[in-house]
């Protein structure tokens, strides 16, 4: 069925690629701002619970199915049972994931394009090219189109180079720099006046909000988005992991790294906002909530860097480099989903598949850019709050109910002969069968009422 498949060359390579996928704008932008506008520590608290108790088991379902099937999501889900109906539903879920991830990439690339243009603006500032820098930071259709397309070219370039020479190589280069830049920025911002106020906002929980349905739905969407779940990204990456690896353990490491970057990013963004406030920059919107949308990253923070003088030039550059790196290692994992399907299913070369699918998705982005007010928020909500958790529900059903239990246990034992004496073995199989689907449904149901 499939031609020679790619495989990550080492555990480190997989960890960088998978955390590269997981760590993205969702962590550095989405998480801190969600926390800020939803009761600070209350959101952090709910998010941590959902990340460990729901997202980690769901991540494991994708990794285990992927490594077992050694195939893209459509074929993997189709092949989990001999029953015709469930095979068809499985393929349907795989396709729905592919469409969802394509739409996610189409809005993600626009935002990532902003990150690139702000990064170049920081370079232009350093070179004292003021009018160029002004153009780069001013929102405009031409600028958005240019940088969105540039971001696609980078994404296509990496994906076309392959699993080892593209995805793994670039993630292994970029992710360590991401950690380094993030830590350096946190340390710097903490030394500034006004930072402690933001820290308090972030870490002191307003527990009256913990039971707020909006907050819980937000935290679940955030957890699914952050771990790249429900659309087959992690399934594909799982299919490139060697059978010698202990999957529950390396999946746990990916979860921990993803959560820690989100929590760390909160230590950067919220203190930076209150520092900005102290410098006379408006950080609240008309309704009195903290500015959380695009304005936060593309107006509040740049205004802050502006007032920092020469230090601000370097800090601004570092910040937008951080964002661009985080975006690229995520976008490649999105494009890989349809590319792997087309390559394996239709025997098209990786080069051709990457180019054509990248360009098709770019066209969707262009449509969104040209109808921004109408489409952008709608596509974000549809994909992340609706499709992703719903598809995650189906992945749990396939892992827990449709797949033959012995075959599932055999896959967990691969690379981990002592699995049977571990906690994961005893808990996860029934957990993914009963608990995960019920939690996802419960969050939806409480939303409806
Ligand atoms: N997890 C990434 C982030 O937090 C985004 C991402 C990468 C993603 N691949 C995905 C989101 C697949 C949903 C589905 O920014």
Image (cartoon, helix red, strand yellow):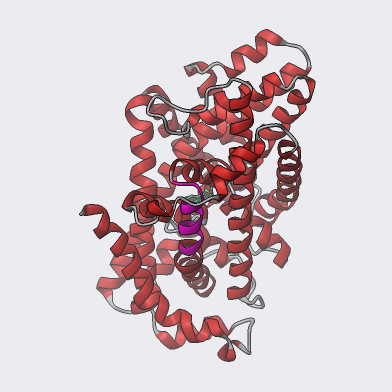
Give residue 71's position: percent from left, percent from top.
50, 66
Q: Residue at x 47, y 33 (%)?
A: 290
Give residue 301's position: percent from left, percent from top.
61, 28
Specify whether residue 4 is painted magenta: no
Give residue 386's position: percent from left, percent from top.
32, 50
> Looking at the rendering, in which quadrant would you find the C terminus?
bottom left
In this rendering, does residue 346 appear at all? no
Most frequent secondary structure within the magenta stretch: helix
Whether 235 is drawn above or below 172: the answer is below
Q: Quadrant of residue 265?
A: top right
Q: Residue at x 60, y 32 (%)?
A: 274
Whether 281 is drawn above or below 11: the answer is above
Whether 200 is drawn above or below 410: the answer is above
| Segment tinted magenta in the rendering | 39-49
Give residue 130's position: percent from left, percent from top.
70, 10
Judge by depth and name the residue closer to the eye, 23 or 174.
23
Judge by depth and name the residue closer to the eye, 35 or 94.
35
In this rendering, does residue 434 appear at all? yes
Q: From the viewer's perspective, tell me whether residue 357 is left or right of residue 127.
A: left
**How many numbered marks does the figure carry?**
0
Specify whether residue 42 is painted magenta: yes
Q: Which residue lies most toward the left here?
A: 449
Q: Quadrant of residue 128?
A: top right
Q: From the viewer's perspective, tell me whether residue 278 is left or right of residue 338.
A: right
Judge by depth and name the residue closer to the eye, 47 or 247.
47
Q: Which residue lies most toward the top here?
A: 131
């Amino acid at each position: 069925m499939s031609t020679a498949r790619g495989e990550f060359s080492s555990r480190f390579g997989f960890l960088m690629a998978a955390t590269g996928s997981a760590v993205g704008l969702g962590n550095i932008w989405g998480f801190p701002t969600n926390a800020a506008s939803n009761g600070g520590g209350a959101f952090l608290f709910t998010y941590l619970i959902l990340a460990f108790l729901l997202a980690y088991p769901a991540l494991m379902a994708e990794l285990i199915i992927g490594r077992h099937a050694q195939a893209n999501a459509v074929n993997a889900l189709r092949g989990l049972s001999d029953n015709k109906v469930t095979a068809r539903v499985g393929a349907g879920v795989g396709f729905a994931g592919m469409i969802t991830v394509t739409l996610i990439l189409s809005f993600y690339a626009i935002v990532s394009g902003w990150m690139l243009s702000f990064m170049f603006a920081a370079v232009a500032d350093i070179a004292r090219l003021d009018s160029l820098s002004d153009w780069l930071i001013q929102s405009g259709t031409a600028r958005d189109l240019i940088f969105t397309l540039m971001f696609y070219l980078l994404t296509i370039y990496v994906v076309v180079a392959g699993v080892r020479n593209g995805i793994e190589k670039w993630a292994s280069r970029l992710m360590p720099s991401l950690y380094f830049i993030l830590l350096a920025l946190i340390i710097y911002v903490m030394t500034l006046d006004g930072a402690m106020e933001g820290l308090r906002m972030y870490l002191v929980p307003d527990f009256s909000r913990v039971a707020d349905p909006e907050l819980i739905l937000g935290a679940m969407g955030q957890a699914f988005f952050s771990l790249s779940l429900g659309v087959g990204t992690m399934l594909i990456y799982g299919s490139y992991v060697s059978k010698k690896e202990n999957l529950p353990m390396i999946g746990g490491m990916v979860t921990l790294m993803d959560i820690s970057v989100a929590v760390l990013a909160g230590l950067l963004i919220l203190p930076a906002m209150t520092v900005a406030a102290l410098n006379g920059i408006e950080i609240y919107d008309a309704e009195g909530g903290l500015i959380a949308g695009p304005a936060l990253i593309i107006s509040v923070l740049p205004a802050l860097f502006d007032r920092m003088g020469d230090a601000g030039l370097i800090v601004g550059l570092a910040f937008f480099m951080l964002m661009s790196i985080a975006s690229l290692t995520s976008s490649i994992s999105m494009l890989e989903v349809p590319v792997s399907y087309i390559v394996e299913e239709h025997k098209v070369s990786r080069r051709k598949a990457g180019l054509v699918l990248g360009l098709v998705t770019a066209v969707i982005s262009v449509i969104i850019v040209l109808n921004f007010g109408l489409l952008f928020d709608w596509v974000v909500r549809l994909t992340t709050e609706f499709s992703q958790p719903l598809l995650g529900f189906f992945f749990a059903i396939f892992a827990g109910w449709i797949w033959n239990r012995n075959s599932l246990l055999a896959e967990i034992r691969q690379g981990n002969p002592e699995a049977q004496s571990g906690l994961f073995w005893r808990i996860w199989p029934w957990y993914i069968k009963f608990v995960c689907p019920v939690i996802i449904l419960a969050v939806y149901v409480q939303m409806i009422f």
